[in-house]
Amino acid sequence: MISKITQTEYLHAIYLNDRLKCENIFSSGQLHSLMTTSIYLHGPRSDYYTLPLDELKNKPGEIFKGLVNPRSGALIEADIIRRGQHLVKFGRNVTEQYQKHILKVADAELAFESHRRELDPKRQLPSRLTCLFICEDDDRGANNIRSMLNETKGILICRVRVEVIPMGYHQADFRWFNAYYKQPLQKYIENYWAGKPYDDSRVWECLLEGTITFCQEDIDNVRLYGNFG
């Protein structure tokens, strides 16, 4: 099921130690999804959407550069681990437990990407590897975006606007991804991309292949608390 965008204001979270994102937000007040950026810098949309899955697994560091999102970032970290190199995060070597976690996340992302391609050959569904993740701008959306994050420190939840018709948009219940992480059943992937709710509650994440614009208050907060050096 291809979702349609229903509002213009959403919530987005950034890590304040992400220097590139902080610099982009402060300089332009915007963030672009990776595919949207590639239209201007790297050529056709198929650059990321049709790359072989084995290249996504084995060469992510060459493919995803600059403003990677957390999901493509997981592929890069997993590749470092598979190569037997030391993975350093925030200046420290990661634990063995984290290495096992990130390998599972990367395998799950590749499985979700594979099904997206089979389901949507016209490439209307945004990829989890290139999109911006946003939530609806209400109390439920704020709770959703907090529960999506692994950490609470060093994170800024921002109010953003989608002012241009996006290249792709999909609304999904992220608990299907969590369920697949725990038990890799194909039906969980199918339910995610079908936009089915996990239960009677609404716990949506919205995948946006497009551009978001930040309000001045959050731009000022990025300037005050973000990493610029």
Image: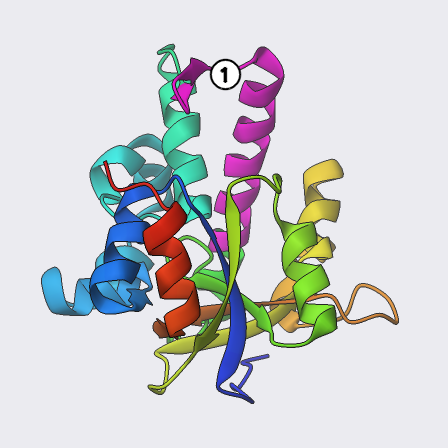
Give left or right: position of 147 versus 108.
Answer: right
Q: Is residue 105 magenta?
A: yes
Image quadrant where residue 180 sits: top right
- Give the residue drawn at x 36%, y 62%: 220
Is residue 114 depicted above or below 227 in this figure?
below
Question: Residue 184, percent across and down?
Answer: 70, 41
Magenta portion: prevailing SS class: helix
Give left or right: position of 221 versus 191.
Answer: left
Q: Please name the residue that numbered disc 1 is placed on.
A: 94
User: 10 Å neighbourhood of mark 1: few (<14), some, or many (≥20)?
Assistant: few
Q: Quadrant of the C terminus?
A: top left
- Give the residue drawn at x 58%, y 12%: 96
- Give the residue drawn at x 53%, y 27%: 103
Q: How is the image coloured?
A: rainbow
Q: Secondary structure at mark 1?
A: loop
Is residue 72 depicted above or below 126 in this figure?
above
Image quadrant where residue 11 sits: bottom right
Looking at the rendering, the stretch of residues picked out in magenta corresponds to 88-113
Is residue 103 depicted above or below 107 in this figure?
above
Question: Residue 166, percent across and down?
Answer: 37, 81
Is residue 177 depicted above or below 160 in this figure?
above
Q: Is residue 117 visible?
A: yes
